Amino acid sequence: MAAAVGRVRTIVRRHSERFERSIPLIASENLLSPYAKELLISDLHSRYAEGLPGERYYEGNEQVDEVETLCLELARRLFRCSFADVRPTSGTVANLAVLKALTEPGELVGTSRLADGAHISSAAFGAFGLRGVKPVYYAWDAERMTIDVPRTREILRAVRPKTCLFGLSLFLFPMPIDELRPTLEEIGARGWYDAAHVLGLIAGGEFQDPLREGCSVVSASTHKTLPGPQHGILLGDGLPPELAQKLQSGAFPGVTSNHHLHAMAALAVSLAEHLEFGRDYAHRTVENARALAGALHAKGFDVVAADLGFTRSHTIAVRVEREGGGEAVARRLADAGIISNKNLLPGDKSPKHPGGIRLGTPEVTRVGMGPKEMERIAGLFDDLLHRGRTTAEVAAAAAELKRGFTTVRYCFGAGEAAYRYYDLVGRDPS
Ligand SMILES: Cc1ncc(COP(=O)(O)O)c(C=O)c1O
């Protein structure tokens, strides 16, 4: 069996080395800081704590209580709000907690379509279906890649959902919550914002601020533009006490038992680091997204929303039908060391054949790349997909570019190896 342990270690090492050589452009991924990463293998990983600080169901939680109290304080400070819960173990779990708190089975809930960029949480086969709520879809303006406000006002007035969810997985532009706010008030609907993708941009002042614009509840993952551990969070401002209590009991016992204390402690570190470095990091992340989009456009790629400046977030979308379609292009890029994902885009004929790819800049920014490197990355796309350079040639050029960018930035202890965890762990068993 020691051989199996060694094998797993070897495979994961190969994975890490592959990412060290690659250009990682998945919009939902990021790298942990050294201080946050260390906590993932601390003793907290072995422990249980149910409930809230000071009201646990297990003994031995005094230090956990201190860490969680600090984590909650940091979250409220970073997002300038009065309510936080750091017990959801992922963004989807956070969404389920909100659904449990705000809705009843059978209710209608406003949201966007998957084809317009919504997350599978909004689908009948995802969290919405689990809670038994039915989506009411907003109208979409495919030109502007955002909600069509006048037509959505009509839909909301006709259907009158009590809860309206805003937020996307293909999130290029802010949601028009401010513009829809009077309609939400008119029909008595509560605004809920899924900030999984844009949490770090919101905290860094680079995107809309949903808690100031008309949403009272925010759910999110904590590992995308907020470069924290894989975990979830709930935020709120000015909530009536009974709603805050419902959200807390949605988190526990609703959708979690133990809340992954090692990740919660790592989140506390990541929140503290974002308070210090988040503005700069968020600014450069968006700057890089726009630079990458502009450079790809200049090389003849059909980057979505060219007339609108491509994006105001960390994400860009590129239609690649001419280059062979989303599936084939994402695969060819991965073989050449550029990691992205195929993505459905509005107007695609079949969900099975996405016409686009989604690219994001959280990780390349985290390792210190800037607009100059975005130009070089666009050049690699052009070489592979337009100029007939071989996969091996482009993979070698990608690895060469990446060589100078393998340490993590925008955190305390910056400059440590971002990918090579195994240097710390030691030899294989034999
Ligand atoms: C908008 C949105 N919400 C929720 C999630 C789910 O997050 P997690 O993977 O943390 O469950 C995602 C994941 O990509 C997302 O894009």
Image (cartoon, helix red, strand yellow):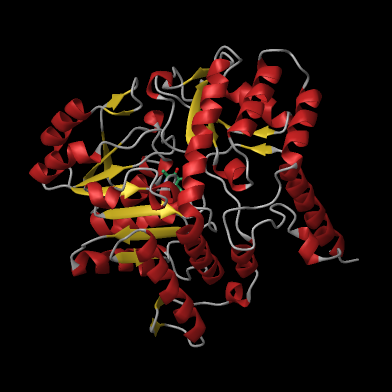
In the picture, the quarter occupied by the N terminus is bottom right
Answer left or right for 294 relative to 420. Answer: left
User: Can residue 319 be seen in the rendering of this structure?
Assistant: yes
Q: Residue at x 82, y 55 (%)?
A: 7
User: Can residue 106 be seen in the rendering of this structure?
Assistant: no
Location of residue 422 (image quadrant) = bottom right
Which is more toward the observer, 328 or 63?
A: 63
Measured as percent of width and height from the top left, residue 251 is found at 37, 64
Q: Residue at x 60, y 75 (%)?
A: 46
Give the answer, above or below, for where 109 lies relative to 150. below
Measured as percent of width and height from the top left, residue 14 is found at 79, 47
Answer left or right for 39 relative to 156. Answer: right
Measured as percent of width and height from the top left, residue 190 is found at 19, 50
Location of residue 143 (image quadrant) = top left
Answer left or right for 24 relative to 59. Answer: right
In the picture, the quarter occupied by the C terminus is bottom right
